[in-house]
Amino acid sequence: VNLNTASKHLLMYVSGLGPQLAKNIVDFRTENGEFSSRAQLKKVPRLGEKAFEQCAGFLRIADATNPLDNSAVHPESYHVVESMAKDLNCTVAELLKDEELQSKIEIKRYITETVGLPTLKDIVAELAKPGRDPRQGIRVFEFAEGIFSMEDLVPGMVVPGIVTNITNFGAFVDIGVKQDGLVHISQMADRFVSNPADVVKLHQHVTVKVLEVDIPRKRIQLSMKGI
């Protein structure tokens, strides 16, 4: 979820937040301008360490000074990635972009009393999926004809899309309009889903049904059920 563009409605579904903290984030952003780092979240009223720990990994900053702020890596693991980059004689930004460098990471050398092998494997996996990059050519398919804006959408309409972000509460899908739509975890399949990543992958082509279009709030609710 883009920390600088997400609405209160989207933020409230992020782990650790809820309606009040989502409102506080939007208010803070309005008063102080865009966030330049995840660490600034700690300045948001009533957003404590526990909430930060839960939400930080899901909130991204596209033009952050620290490229890890636009990755799936949690802030508490930044020091590990920085050590990996230093040992490979590269920058963190280079490590995020280069699969060859990532393959050279000797993962076991970073095991400590507080960072175990499973955590390190997760960190390396997150390195391979940094922020959404529009230059990666993910739109190698056609969106629905005649769909250019939210005004063109009608509930019940079935359209193709591309998964642009996966969170703990669902997946965001680009359907060819300016605003990505949300497939809530409860709408991802005709069965119980505990983890959205079990159903979809980043940049996957999917077919979705439009459930609700809220133009004033820039919200699009989608479903993958029964399709």
Image (cartoon, helix red, strand yellow):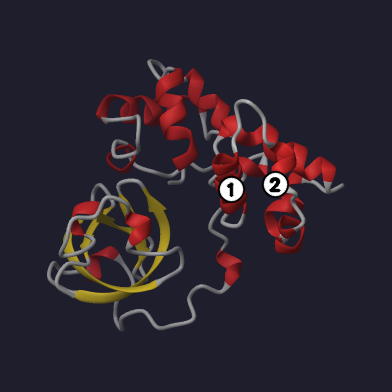
**Residue that carries the numbered disc 2 in the rendered image:** 107
Q: Residue sitting at 33 percent across and 25 percent down? A: 21
Q: Nearer the viewer, residue 117 or 96?
A: 117
Dot 2, crowdedness within 10 Å: few (<14), some or many (≥20)?
A: some
Percent of width and height locating residue 126:
56, 50
Q: Residue at 69% x, 40% y: name it.
A: 81
User: Is disc 1 placed on a helix, strand or loop?
Assistant: helix
33 relative position to 219: left or right = right
Q: Is residue 101 above or below residue 41?
A: below
Mark 1 and 2 residues: CB-CB less than 8 Å, in contact?
Answer: yes
SS label for mark 2? helix
- Residue 15: where, in percent of width, then height? 35, 35
Q: What percent of the width, then of the height, locates residue 136?
A: 59, 69
Q: Residue at x 56, y 56 (%)?
A: 129
- Residue 84 vs residue 28: left or right? right
Q: Quadrant of residue 198?
A: bottom left
Q: Is residue 4 visible?
A: no
Question: Residue at the spot x=76%, y=37% of the render?
Answer: 83
Horizontal and vertical percent for residue 141? 43, 83
Q: Amino acid at mark 2?
A: Ile
Q: Nearer the viewer, residue 50 or 139?
A: 50
Q: Which residue is mark 1?
A: 121
Res 175 → quadrant: bottom left
Query: How many neighbours does mark 1 have within 10 angstroms: few (below 14), some (14-19), or many (20 or more)?
Result: few
Relative to 148, 104 lies left or right: right
The label shown at residue 29 is none
Q: Quadrant of residue 109?
A: top right
Mark 1 or mark 2: whose residue is earlier in sequence: 2
Distance between the alpha carbons at the discs numbered 1 and 2:
7 Å
Q: Could you tell me the amino acid type at mark 1?
A: Lys
